[in-house]
Image (spheres, helix red, strand yellow):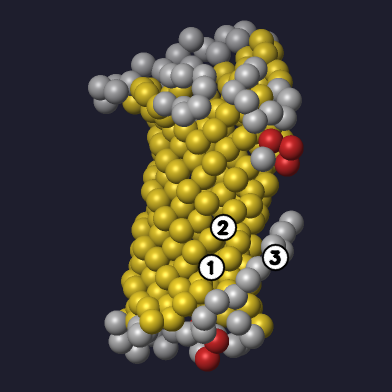
Amino acid sequence: MFLLAPFFVMGQDLDTTNTAKPRWELSARWMNYRSFSQQKLDIPMKGGYPILQSRTLALEAGYTLVKGKVQHTFRINAGLPASLQADAGTGSNRLLEERGNTHFRSGMNHQLTFPLFQWKGLNGRHGFSSGLLYERRSLVYLSGSQETTRDINFYLGPSLKLRYALSSSWKIKAGFDAHFYLPYLNYGQLTARNSRDEIAFSSDYRGFYYQTIFRLGVSSGILTPNPIELGVLKNDMVGFASRKPSFEATDIVHFKLDRLLHFYLKYRF
């Protein structure tokens, strides 16, 4: 499910001469996930201990289509199911059992960009990105109780891409995306069980989240005929979810205070 957004164009595009044909890309990411506890039930939300954290491998496939000065990039990604650990702030776990805690996330994304400016070796594009994010998290507490959340979220927001050509083979690439998750377009479910495996609480929820993504990479075409890119991606997400769609922090059922750091290797062909 993708959304094609309206656009406007400024300047000339450096990419239209060498990316007119469709391109595929494959990437592998080492993903570090950290989810902070919530200390305050209003905005701005504040994070504190304990922290839930995991490390896992994520894979992504992408396809870029260029039509004139318009560039469409479609991506789909998924992380391997990861085991979660808790840190109480002292390096010790006072929250979760050693086993049974898992986290999984996957998503689809469509990025639509247009020429913004060109100055010497620096090229900029701007536009919009939209997509879907699915997350599932299961926690088993030391008390024996359990909590499972699963949600699917639609997002939309502005996108910016920068590229600086150091030479014909070496390029520095940077990007920024801001994603808005509106509560009327998202759905989640939380289920809590007691130590006897009986349902103690169950509720649907609608999330209102804000996400920022920064990426920085270096691309080289020296070792292979097609460029290889190494880089880092910082992903921060904050927000709350209520039983009914709402932009106010009332009747909170779930929240996200998450930070992900990705180290990636990308190959284009």
- Say which residue appears at 72% left-offset and 59% top-offset: 3
Disc 3 secondary structure class = loop
Residue closer to the observer: 87 or 164? 164
Q: Is residue 31 above or below residue 144?
A: below
Mark 1 = which residue? 126
* Left or right of 6, for residue 83: left
Mark 2 = which residue? 158
* Left or right of 28, for residue 172: left
Identify the mark nearer the N-term, 1 or 2: 1
Residue 49 visible here: yes
Residue 74 visible here: no
Mark 3 = which residue? 6
Residue contact at pointers 1 and 2, CB within 8 angstroms: yes
- Say which residue appears at 57% left-offset and 49% top-offset: 179
Identity, as a three-letter code, of the amino acid under mark 3: Pro
Residue contact at pointers 2 and 3, CB within 8 angstroms: no
Q: Is residue 141 above or below residue 17?
A: above
Identity, as a three-letter code, of the amino acid under mark 2: Pro
Question: Crowding near pointer 1: few (<14 within 10 Å), some, many (20+)?
Answer: many
The residues bearing labels 3 and 1 have C-alpha atoms spaced at a distance of: 12 Å
Identity, as a three-letter code, of the amino acid under mark 1: His
User: Quadrant of the rendered structure where residue 250 is?
Assistant: top right
Disc 1 secondary structure class = strand
Identify the mark nearer the N-term, 3 or 1: 3
Disc 2 secondary structure class = strand
Give the x, y percent position of residue 184: 74, 37
Give the x, y percent position of residue 46: 42, 26
User: Quadrant of the rendered structure where residue 151 is?
Assistant: top right
